[in-house]
Amino acid sequence: MKEAIAIALIVAPFQCGGGNDPPREETAGDALWSLSEDFEAKGDHAASRRTLEFLVNRYPSSRHADAAKRKLAAEDAGTE
């Protein structure tokens, strides 16, 4: 049994990722925020806005929800 544990401890570090994995979206809110930014960069303001609205409505606790609300409010006020 001790040998199995020792082998597991020796092999375990090689099983962990080496940090070379491509970055991933952490949450749906992150993905939606990025999608909205992509739409905006391509000039599709309507799609960007719909995406932000979906983010705010579906994921209100997302770390991007407040920024999305501010961006939508700025658009409504005509300051963006």
Image (cartoon, rainbow, N blue to C red):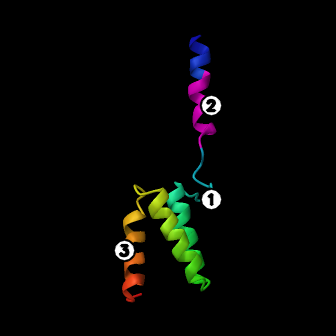
Q: Residue at x 60, y 46 (%)?
A: 17
- Crowd around label 2: few <14 · some 14–19 · many ≥20 (10 Å): few
- Name the quadrant of the C terminus: bottom left
Label 3, label 1: how far apart the Cα atoms are: 30 Å
> In this figure, which residue is indicated by the disc labeled 2?
11
User: Can residue 76 be found in the magenta stretch?
Assistant: no
The local secondary structure at tag 1 comes to loop
Query: Is 22 situated above or below 52?
Result: above
Q: Quadrant of residue 77?
A: bottom left
Lower position in the chain sequence, tag 2 or tag 1: 2
Lower position in the chain sequence, tag 3 or tag 2: 2
The amino acid type, in three-letter code, at marker 1 is Pro
- Is 2 on the left-hand or right-hand side of 65? right
The local secondary structure at tag 2 comes to helix
The amino acid type, in three-letter code, at marker 3 is Arg
- Is 34 on the left-hand or right-hand side of 60? right
Residue 73 picture location, percent across and down: 37, 78
> In this figure, which residue is indicated by the disc labeled 1?
22
Depth check: give the residue in front, 38 or 45: 45
The local secondary structure at tag 3 comes to helix
User: Can residue 15 be found in the magenta stretch?
Assistant: yes
Residue 11 picture location, percent across and down: 62, 31
Q: Which mark is residue 46?
A: none
Q: Residue at x 60, y 82 (%)?
A: 44
- Magenta residues, start to end: 7-16
